[in-house]
Each structure stands twice: as C-alpha cells, then as structure tokens.
Image (spheres, grey):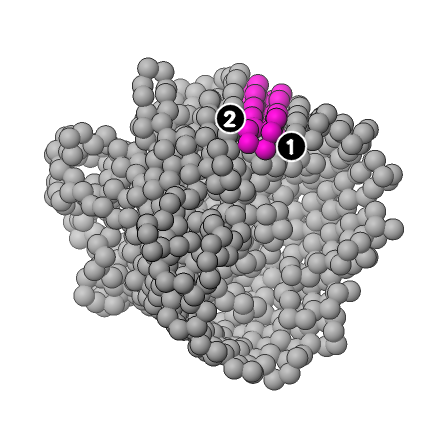
Amino acid sequence: VIKKDYFALPAGLQSLEEDIPKGMASPTPEGMVSPRPLKRKPGVKKDSDFTLKGEYQVGFGIEGSDFLWKKANYNLNEENTRILSDDALNRRENTFDPAVYSYIRFEIDRPREEGWSFHSNFDISPWSFIGKSKQAVVTSDDDVFDIEYKYWSNMGYTVNEVVYSNLRGDSVALPEMKVVDGKVPLITVTSLNTNVLTIPELEIDREFWPFRELWADYKSDNITLKIFPVGMADMAYTSDDPLRLSNHRNYWEESQWLINWQPGHLNSGLATPDFQKGWWDDSLVFSARDSASVFLTSLRGFSLNLESDKTDLDFTVASPKELWQDYDSFSTFESALRGKYYHADNFKLGFIHTSKLGRNKDEFDAYNYAVGVDASIGLGDNTEVLLAGATSRSEFDRSSSTYKTEKRGNSFHVSLINSSSEMAGKNYFGLIPKDEESFYKLRLALTHMDKGFESILSSFCETRDDAFWSRHLTFRKPFGYYYGGLYGPSLSWDDLKTFRIGDGIDYGRDVVGLRWEGENFLSGNLDVLFDLRNVHDTNGKYIENVTRLETTYKLTPRLTTKLLGIYHDLPKTVAGIDPFVIDADSGDNFQNSLVEDGKDPSLKTVSLGTKYDFFDWLDLSFVWEHTNDSTLAYDNSPRALLHWTSFTTFSEYDNTFRKEIVGLNHPGEFPLPPYSYFDIFKVGLGLRPKDNLEIYLDYTRNEYKWAHIIDDNVNHIGLEAGYSPSEKIGFYFRYVYSRMKDISELNEDSRVVNRDHHSVFSEMRLRLSKDSELIGQYGVGSTAGIAMATFTPFGGGV
C-alpha cells in the first residue's frame, strides 16, 4: 500500500492554515463519532478562497497465486456468523478485513470565520461504485418474494440480507453472490420454511456515488446555520440532557439518526392471517461501512444554533439516505430541538423535543416523539443536582387501521454529583484530577423509564451492560505508532472508558446507581473505583444488582498491584430461557432448552494482578482471575453464534401478530446455570532495550476451553514486536500460537475438536515524507484502531 496524505493543488487553490487532530474526532460520552477528516497542511489564511486538500492510497495484494487489487469488507472484523463459513470473503477463524483497496479522497472548502462557508468531501474508492438489480418477483409454494440484489465494488459481491415474503410469513437469507460481467447468475436457495426458490439471472444497474459530505454554513455572532444535502453521522444532534434523549449509543454503534423505517405487512396467505409489525431497520446501516469503519449512510437536512448571553437553542432536522437508496427517496424524517436557559452560574433550565417519522409509500406509517425538561442546580462549587422528566408517544403501522399499535410512557431522572474538583459546567466524565493532587468524584443517580417510553433517536440496549473487556483485569496496552499508523488511534482510552461500565438504564426499568472514584490517594499511590447499580422493572420485579470494586496500588515505585472484584447478582432462572444471550432487535432473551427452572445464574469474579518494573526497559506482569463468568466476560462469543431462528404468533387486542424467536443450538456444550468456577492465568513480559524497540511476550492458560479470539484470554503464547530504526521506517510483527475448541466442527458435524492455530501478522511502514507512507503487510490480523471494531481495545486479539 502506498498512502499519500496530501497532493499538489491546482493553480489558484491553496491549503488551509490550521492543523486538525489526527484520526477521527473523539466522541462525547454519549458516543458521538465523527467521520475521519483529512489532515491539513499549513499554508494560508483562514479566509482564503476555495481550497483543495486530499489524499490517495494505492494498494494491492497477493494471496496464493491470486493478484488482488481490491478485497475489503469491514464486516469481516465483526464477531458474527461469518466465522462459521468460508463462502465469499469469509475465512472462518481468520475473519479480519484484508483492506486491500485504492482510493482518492479530497475536500473542497471555502472557510470563513463569519458569513457563508462551504465544505465538501469526495471519496473515490471501491465503496463509491454501487448498484442494484431490478426487482424480481419469485414465487414458491403459493408465496411471493420480491428479490432485489444490492452490489458494492469493494467485494465484487452482492450484499447478504434477509428478504421477507409477501403472503405466508416466510423469509430467505440471500447469500453474497459474485457479480460477473454485471450480472448475478441464476441460483436456487431454501427459505426458512424449507421452500425452494429459483432466482433468475439479474443484471446490476451500476451507480457512482462519491459524496461523503456536502454542506454550507452561515456564522455570525449569535447564529450558526448549517445546510447539509449530504452529511455524515456527525450531523446528528447529540443532546446533553440527563436522560440523553438524542444520539445516545455505544462508541461502536451506528447512530439511530441513520436508521430507516421498515413497514410491517399482513401475511394474508395463511389460513389464519397474522401481521408482522414494522421496525426501525439497522441491518444495512450497520454493515455498510468502509474499512475505516465510517458509516456510509448519509444524512440530509439542516441545523440551526441561536445563542445569547443567557440562552442557547439548537434545532436539527434530517432524513437518512442508505447507501443504495435513491437520493430523491425519503422514507424517514427526524428532528431534535434543545433549548437551555442559564439563570445564573449555578442554575440551568433545559428543554428537549425529539421526533422521528417513518413512511409507508405515501403515508406516514410510524412516529415517535419525546418531550423533556431538565434542570441543573449547583450547590456550591463542588456539588450539582440534575433533575429531568420526559414523556413520549409512539404509533406504528398507522397505515393499517386494524393492526396499528400505540405506546406512551414517562421517564424521570435525578442525580447528585460531588467532586473535590470544581464542577464549572462539566459532566461527570469531564471531572479529572489536577496534576498529582488527591481527587475524588461521586455520582448517585435514580432513573425511571416506563416500558412504553421511547426516544427513537437514542439506543440504550448496548450501554446498559458492562463491556466484555471491562470484566477482565489487564496491564496490557497497545503499541504506540503501529497501533494506528499515519493517523493514530481513532479514539483515546479516555474516550473509551466512559463506555466501560454499564449503567443499567433502559426502557421498562428503574435503576439506582452509585459510583465513587478516587485517584492519587496515599501519597499518589492508590486509585479506587466503586460502582453499584440496582435494577428492577417498573412493576417492581428484580432484574439485577451489579457491584464492582477496582483498585490500583503502587506498593513501591517499581511494584504495581491491581484488584478487580465483580458480583453480578441475578434472580433465579426460568426454564428454557437463557439468562444472558439477548436478541438486540427485540430485547428478548434467547431460548435455551437445557436451562432448568430455579437455578442461580449469578456471576462472581475476583482478579488479582501485579506488575514489576525491574528496569526502565524490563517489566513482568502476572494476572490471576477466578470466576464463573463464561458469558458476559466473553460477549457470549462464540456460543451466541450457534442459534436458530423461527416465528411464533401472539394475540394483542384481538389481533394476531407474528414475532421472531431465537434459540441456541448445541447448548449442552457450553456452561449452564449455576455456572462453574474456573481460573485464568496470564503472564506478560515487556522489553524496551532501546527507545525504538518494543517487545511483548504473553502467555495465557484459561480453564474455560470455549474462550475465543476476541481478546487475549484464549489459551495462547504470543510474541509482539515493534522496531523503528529511524523516524522514517518501522516494523511490526506478531505471532500467536493458540489452542481452542473448533466452533465450525461443532456447527457442521456436532463434534467437539480442539484445534491448534498459528497466526502470523507482520507489517513494514516506510514514511516517504511527513504525509506519505509505503506499507507492506503479510499474514492475517487487525491493524484497526480501538474505534474500529467490537473486540478488545487493549490489543492482543489473536
């Protein structure tokens, strides 16, 4: 790969003066991530005429006897069912994105401190060449399917997606199909109801879509207006209200502003007709990303900010355009209005209104709105009280008078924040110690959300629980330059740690949360974190109580110790229901036929670690973990991949509805409640014999044999090395020998087989100039930064 970050400008065009931070913009604690901007070169004044800056990359690869000039698919980084298949770009265990592709990316700007500015971002890459087939009507067993292939050039394949039938409630999973001479060949596939469909050969109508950003804004002393015909996810409004009603999400999730409405439909061909409810469909949005993990769904709309000495008003209106959606097609509209009034330094009053509308052809088929008020009351310089209340109303499938459904509900929040540091308008995560002074902060919060309460512009499902990697203790940290390359990591650890521990908050829940953090105690040697959340549903039924204690203590200047303790208390099990594996779409737990009634699924973890710095260039770390957490601490991987899908019907207000149910396959091969305890032993040896040479050797012995490749808790021996003989050249190498149970053998032949794996990845980076690199890679692995995937952010994924 040859990567050039800047190219010469045509006569009369000049580059911008200011430098911007490398990599993608960091998110707020609510999870807002902006698309990666281009690096600027110093040049001229800000108020120059139109400017041009850009970058290009030329890449190719060799695999066996094949010469590759493009082979890239970010979705291969995800821990999904690709690991069970070797079709298309899948590689079973080795599912990292090869990221072999070329591109030209450039921006044309007209920057102004006041008045009208203009910005555009064009990307000519494999993801810019897309296409669709004409819709084919395929019949089978008196049922009808409307088949339309979607194509993108980064793979040369069609997109794998699920298509639902029109009459009998059937569905078919379209495979990824190789496009040859602009056509998809005839294929035969089997539906969920075992019907055989013959899909004829279809021609792809190609389209060139190079637009990433296109917007203009107007700035004056009190007004900022932005009009964005094409915008990225950073155009979505992220609210700062205590209930986080707009754009709340986890750092790796897509924004809810990008998601379109999928209308429901009546299965009229059945003896007893039933109705499948409409839903907000994120399947294409989540998968349509480039190899830098930038979501390729656009936003079209405008935003307005009005400011005065005591008031602040933000208003944003947008409509998402999925990658394959025609630009003049509008199926969803959304808006957020946020107002704040500052009465004094210690009192703020806020208002928020969010809405989202979905269309079914020419009718508005769904809507949701949430209205909230909030207040921030300062009790001195170090204490703040936050109050918030909101109400919402939703109607879905409004185009069907028979099957229309409604929801409404309320939500309330009160919290107390106290810190040894001055609050000064900061949120909890913005409170940090000054220098080496002793520091603490405390937050006590109570949150109630009715089951019928919804703010569709936010997602709470993934932020209510702990991140899997936060349930292990580690001293590991990623290597420096070679972790992110020319741009550096997209997110810093300070960004990510806000998502590390869940808050328990979601619809239909009452949550009491307490967190206390202290740093630099005992002469700067002790850091402590205590976190507690108690969760009930709004009817009073117990859901969980999670208690966490973490300490880091420097016994001597060279000896550091760590402690992690987690007690996750849960109610007794219900027969046939897995207590941990959850369908993210419906929120329902997977079925697990072997779970018995009345068992205790509670989880307990104690982990101790120590690190000794023998010299500045040599350190040795050891971690021991005793736990029965074989579920959440592994993100339910790989057992959640082995699942079946079916449908059931239920009655609601004398109407029959259809609902998807999901259950686990091979549940007997994985632990069941009550979960047995096991031990993990990890050793790491760090060597830095020179400033430009870093070596890390690690070993893990894990008694849980189904630990897999998402982090370094799999049984393995690893060697990692980074060497930079000069500022212009550097080398990275990682070898891992691992042993684990083969999930593919279990899936295909119901056999449990232990497999040895040898994983090699190496990289050479040559800096040809300040803004150019020549990159050579061999083997399989991930060089993505910590914002780019859902596996561990510490490095060491096998």
Residue 176 coordinates in the image, percent (x, y): 27, 33
Q: Is residue 230 above or below residue 769?
A: below
Find disc 1 in the rendering and name its residue.
676
- Provide the major secondary structure of the magenta segment: strand
Residue 572 coordinates in the image, percent (x, y): 60, 46
Q: CA separation, marks 2 and 1?
A: 41 Å
Q: Is residue 13 above or below residue 3?
A: below
* Amino acid tagged 2: Glu
Q: Which of 164 and 358 is in front in this view?
A: 358
Residue 761 coordinates in the image, percent (x, y): 51, 23
The residue located at (41%, 25%) in the rendering is: 92
Task: Judge depth for marks 2 and 1 and give the one in front.
Answer: 2
Q: In this view, does 457 lie to the left or right of 18?
A: left
Residue 626 coordinates in the image, percent (x, y): 71, 33
Residue 336 is covered by the magenta coloring: no
Q: Is residue 107 above or below residue 789?
A: below
Number of numbered discs on residues = 2
Tell me the element at label 2: strand
Find disc 2 in the rendering and name its residue.
763
Q: Nearer the viewer, residue 17 or 587?
A: 17
The residue located at (16%, 34%) in the rendering is: 182
Residue 568 visible in the shown view: yes
Indicate the quadrant containing the N terminus: top left, top right, bottom left or bottom right: top left
Q: Which numbered circle lies on residue 212?
A: none
The span shown in magenta is 713-741
Other residues around mark 1 within 10 Å, as few (<14) / some (14–19) / many (≥20)? some
The residue located at (31%, 19%) in the rendering is: 66
Residue 734 is covered by the magenta coloring: yes
Q: Is residue 434 left or right of residue 63?
A: right
* Amino acid tagged 1: Ser
